Image (cartoon, rainbow, N blue to C red):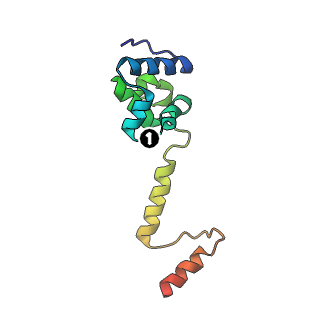
Amino acid sequence: MNNEIPINPSQRWEWLKYQLRSQGCSLRKLSDELGVTGNAVQMAKYTPYPRMERAIAKKLGLTPQVIWPERWNQDGTPCRERPNRAETLSTKLKTAKAQNCLYDKDSGSNASTHRQMVREA
Protein backbone atom coordinates (compact mmCIF):
# COMPACT_ATOMS: atom_id res chain seq x y z
CA MET A 1 0.00 0.00 0.00
CA ASN A 2 1.23 3.47 -0.85
CA ASN A 3 1.83 5.22 2.46
CA GLU A 4 1.93 8.68 0.85
CA ILE A 5 -1.47 9.93 1.95
CA PRO A 6 -2.39 13.15 0.12
CA ILE A 7 -2.90 16.26 2.22
CA ASN A 8 -5.48 17.76 -0.13
CA PRO A 9 -8.92 16.48 1.05
CA SER A 10 -10.31 15.71 -2.43
CA GLN A 11 -7.12 13.89 -3.45
CA ARG A 12 -7.13 12.06 -0.11
CA TRP A 13 -10.70 10.86 -0.72
CA GLU A 14 -9.78 9.52 -4.15
CA TRP A 15 -6.72 7.85 -2.60
CA LEU A 16 -8.95 6.20 0.04
CA LYS A 17 -11.37 4.90 -2.59
CA TYR A 18 -8.47 3.56 -4.64
CA GLN A 19 -6.96 1.81 -1.61
CA LEU A 20 -10.33 0.24 -0.75
CA ARG A 21 -10.81 -0.96 -4.35
CA SER A 22 -7.31 -2.44 -4.38
CA GLN A 23 -8.36 -4.58 -1.40
CA GLY A 24 -11.57 -5.72 -3.08
CA CYS A 25 -13.82 -3.38 -1.16
CA SER A 26 -15.74 -0.22 -1.96
CA LEU A 27 -17.57 2.47 -0.05
CA ARG A 28 -20.86 0.71 -0.88
CA LYS A 29 -19.63 -2.64 0.44
CA LEU A 30 -18.31 -0.94 3.55
CA SER A 31 -21.68 0.73 4.18
CA ASP A 32 -23.42 -2.62 3.75
CA GLU A 33 -21.02 -4.26 6.23
CA LEU A 34 -21.68 -1.51 8.77
CA GLY A 35 -25.43 -1.55 8.20
CA VAL A 36 -25.58 2.14 7.30
CA THR A 37 -26.56 4.04 4.19
CA GLY A 38 -24.02 4.91 1.55
CA ASN A 39 -24.46 8.56 2.47
CA ALA A 40 -23.27 7.89 6.02
CA VAL A 41 -19.91 6.67 4.75
CA GLN A 42 -19.73 9.55 2.26
CA MET A 43 -20.18 12.05 5.12
CA ALA A 44 -16.63 11.28 6.25
CA LYS A 45 -15.46 13.09 3.13
CA TYR A 46 -17.07 16.38 4.11
CA THR A 47 -17.19 16.48 7.89
CA PRO A 48 -15.60 14.76 10.87
CA TYR A 49 -17.46 11.50 11.46
CA PRO A 50 -15.41 9.42 13.95
CA ARG A 51 -17.34 6.17 13.49
CA MET A 52 -16.95 6.15 9.71
CA GLU A 53 -13.36 7.35 9.92
CA ARG A 54 -12.53 4.43 12.22
CA ALA A 55 -14.28 1.95 9.92
CA ILE A 56 -12.47 3.17 6.80
CA ALA A 57 -9.13 3.22 8.59
CA LYS A 58 -9.66 -0.27 10.02
CA LYS A 59 -10.47 -1.62 6.56
CA LEU A 60 -7.19 -0.14 5.28
CA GLY A 61 -5.17 -1.33 8.26
CA LEU A 62 -4.44 2.23 9.36
CA THR A 63 -5.57 4.52 12.14
CA PRO A 64 -7.89 7.48 11.59
CA GLN A 65 -5.22 9.75 13.07
CA VAL A 66 -2.92 8.85 10.16
CA ILE A 67 -5.54 9.46 7.49
CA TRP A 68 -7.20 12.55 8.99
CA PRO A 69 -4.63 14.07 11.37
CA GLU A 70 -6.48 17.40 11.41
CA ARG A 71 -9.63 15.71 12.79
CA TRP A 72 -8.02 13.84 15.68
CA ASN A 73 -6.16 14.91 18.83
CA GLN A 74 -2.74 13.52 19.71
CA ASP A 75 -4.28 11.31 22.42
CA GLY A 76 -6.52 9.55 19.88
CA THR A 77 -9.75 11.36 20.73
CA PRO A 78 -11.73 13.06 17.96
CA CYS A 79 -11.55 16.84 17.63
CA ARG A 80 -15.02 18.27 18.08
CA GLU A 81 -16.39 21.77 17.92
CA ARG A 82 -18.65 21.01 20.87
CA PRO A 83 -16.82 18.38 22.93
CA ASN A 84 -18.80 16.23 25.33
CA ARG A 85 -22.08 17.90 24.42
CA ALA A 86 -24.05 14.65 24.30
CA GLU A 87 -22.26 13.24 27.31
CA THR A 88 -23.07 16.36 29.37
CA LEU A 89 -26.76 16.24 28.50
CA SER A 90 -26.88 12.52 29.25
CA THR A 91 -25.28 13.10 32.65
CA LYS A 92 -27.81 15.82 33.50
CA LEU A 93 -30.71 13.54 32.58
CA LYS A 94 -29.34 10.66 34.63
CA THR A 95 -28.82 12.96 37.60
CA ALA A 96 -32.36 14.31 37.36
CA LYS A 97 -33.82 10.82 37.14
CA ALA A 98 -31.70 9.63 40.04
CA GLN A 99 -32.99 12.47 42.18
CA ASN A 100 -36.53 11.84 40.88
CA CYS A 101 -37.01 15.50 40.20
CA LEU A 102 -37.90 17.70 37.31
CA TYR A 103 -35.86 20.54 35.92
CA ASP A 104 -36.67 23.83 37.59
CA LYS A 105 -36.96 25.66 34.32
CA ASP A 106 -40.30 25.02 32.63
CA SER A 107 -40.30 24.87 28.87
CA GLY A 108 -43.56 26.76 28.68
CA SER A 109 -45.56 23.62 27.96
CA ASN A 110 -48.02 21.93 30.25
CA ALA A 111 -45.72 18.93 30.70
CA SER A 112 -45.15 19.55 34.41
CA THR A 113 -48.91 19.89 35.01
CA HIS A 114 -49.52 16.67 33.12
CA ARG A 115 -46.87 14.84 35.13
CA GLN A 116 -48.45 16.07 38.37
CA MET A 117 -51.88 14.84 37.23
CA VAL A 118 -50.45 11.43 36.33
CA ARG A 119 -48.82 11.11 39.76
CA GLU A 120 -52.06 11.99 41.53
CA ALA A 121 -54.11 9.55 39.47
Residue 92 x %, y %: 48, 60
Residue 57 x %, y %: 39, 27
Residue occupying the point 53% across, 28% down = 45
Q: Which residue is mark 1?
A: 36
Residue occupying the point 41% across, 22% down = 66
Write down the quadrant of residue 106 in the picture: bottom right
Q: Residue furthest left?
A: 61
Q: Is residue 47 above or below residue 66?
A: below
Residue 54 in sight in this render: no
Write down the quadrant of residue 95 in the picture: bottom left
In the image shown, does 105 or 27 lie closer to the viewer? 27
Please tell me whether mark 1 sits on a helix, a strand or a loop: loop
Q: Is residue 45 above or below residue 35?
A: above
Residue occupying the point 49% across, 30% down = 71
Badge 1 density bin: few <14, some 14–19, many ≥20, Cα 10 Å: few
Amino acid type, mark 1: Val
In the image shown, does 27 or 64 lie closer to the viewer? 27
Residue 51 x %, y %: 42, 37
In the image shown, does 25 or 40 lie closer to the viewer? 25
Q: For the N terminus, which image quadrant?
A: top left
Left or right of 111? Residue 71 is left
Residue 30 in sight in this render: yes
Q: Residue furthest right?
A: 108
Residue 65 x %, y %: 42, 26
Write down the quadrant of residue 58 in the picture: top left
Q: Residue furthest bottom?
A: 121
Q: Is residue 96 above or below residue 62?
A: below
